[in-house]
Amino acid sequence: MEETTIPFKSLHSREYQGHKKKVHSVAWNSNGTKLASGSVDQTARIWNIEPHGHSKAKDLELKGHTDSVDQLCWDPKHSDLVATASGDKSVRLWDARSGKCTQQAELSGENINITYKPDGTHVAVGNRDDELTILDVRKFKPLHRRKFNYEVNEIAWNMAGDFFFLTTGLGTVEVLSYPSLKPLDTLTAHTAGCYCIAIDPKGRYFAVGSADSLVSLWDISDMLCLRTFTKLEWPVRTISFNYSGEYIASASEDLFIDIANVQTGRTVHQIPCRAAMNSVEWNPKYNLLAYAGDDKNPKYNTDEGVFRIFGFESS
């Protein structure tokens, strides 16, 4: 595959402000036109993003949660449906056109993770008590509940939806078959807890970010580690592949986001940050990277409530 080199040096970031407290999660919808942000301020917001970035983004506030919105994700088959997971123990489904909550499920613990099955039929939610709940999207009722006796950090399906991955505090990735949730494999991935996981949009690889400050790249067909990315010095909190699968972004408490070439493992660009990062996510159609972290206002030492998008050309 021939690499399409992005002119990283000529690109810059734009800042989007709307939340009152720090942003925990950013996610693009399936056609790359809207971005959702979830915040400690108990709200999520929907932003209409013009890919070339010249118009001001309008935003819509999603109100209803009574605790931090820790993670959110879009329905992969419907560009106006977004799901939010909150510390208030509820999971909500929203219509991004009206800003109204269309479905709600009350679960047993403080939710920290949420992900859609690639065919859009199921949503998986993880909580602070290491419990996994799978919801049927139509009825919005739990299909499976499973409590694990180890720390579960992040969850993901493969593109075909027949494997389910858990990253654990033991430094392993647990591979379960889906829908049975029977254990298939335990990958000893890192020497410290595995925090985050990303699936390559072409379905060839997955990547794991760890407390040992490394990102490992795995071949999904034979579950072998192909290489590691070593630029970060702090525990890796968030990772994302770009839409072509050529680049991977990873971030931590280091004051930069590392963008590396997936094939060579080499860093191609670093985006400077002012704070530890909570969430990075590439747009599914364009080379735009949304990112959010613990930014503070230096004058007042209060949360800034901003996120940024990198990839705009200087106009």
Image (cartoon, rainbow, N blue to C red):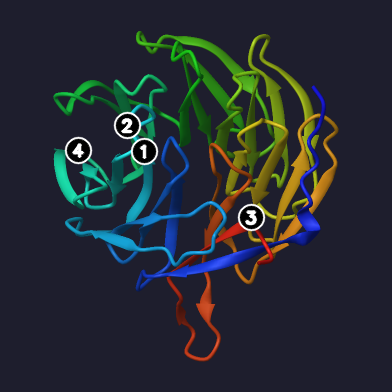
Give the Cα separation between the discs numbered 4 and 2: 24 Å
Q: Which of marks 2 and 3 is nearer the N terminus?
A: 2
> Pointer 1 and pointer 3: residues touching (CB < 8 Å)?
no
Q: Which of marks 4 and 2 is nearer the N terminus?
A: 2
- Position of residue 158 measured from the top left corner of the image (x, y, whole percent): 51, 19
Give the Cα separation between the discs numbered 1 and 2: 8 Å
> Pointer 2 and pointer 3: residues touching (CB < 8 Å)?
no
Give the Cα separation between the discs numbered 1 and 3: 24 Å
Q: Name the residue under label 1.
A: 74
Decide which of 76, 258 is in the foreground and name it. 76
Q: Name the residue under label 4.
A: 107
Q: Name the residue under label 3.
A: 252
Q: What amino acid does circle 4 point to?
A: Leu
- Position of residue 112 measured from the top left corner of the image (x, y, whole percent): 37, 45
Q: Which of marks 1 and 4 is nearer the N terminus?
A: 1
> Pointer 4 and pointer 3: residues touching (CB < 8 Å)?
no
Decide which of 124, 289 is in the foreground and name it. 289
Picture disc at residue 78? 2
Categorize mark 1 by other alpha carbons within 10 Å: few (<14), some (14-19), many (20+): many
- Disc 3 is placed on an element classified as loop
> Pointer 1 and pointer 2: residues touching (CB < 8 Å)?
yes
Q: Earlier in the sequence, mark 1 or mark 3?
A: 1
**At 61% from the left edge and 22% from the top edge, which residue is drawn?**
202
**At 28% from the left edge and 60% from the top edge, which residue is drawn?**
60
- Disc 1 is placed on an element classified as strand
Q: What amino acid does circle 3 point to?
A: Ser
Q: Considering the image in quadrants, where does the C terminus appear? A: bottom right
Nearer to us: label 1 or label 3: 1
> Pointer 1 and pointer 4: residues touching (CB < 8 Å)?
no
Q: What amino acid does circle 2 point to?
A: His
Give the Cα separation between the discs numbered 4 and 3: 29 Å
Nearer to us: label 4 or label 2: 2
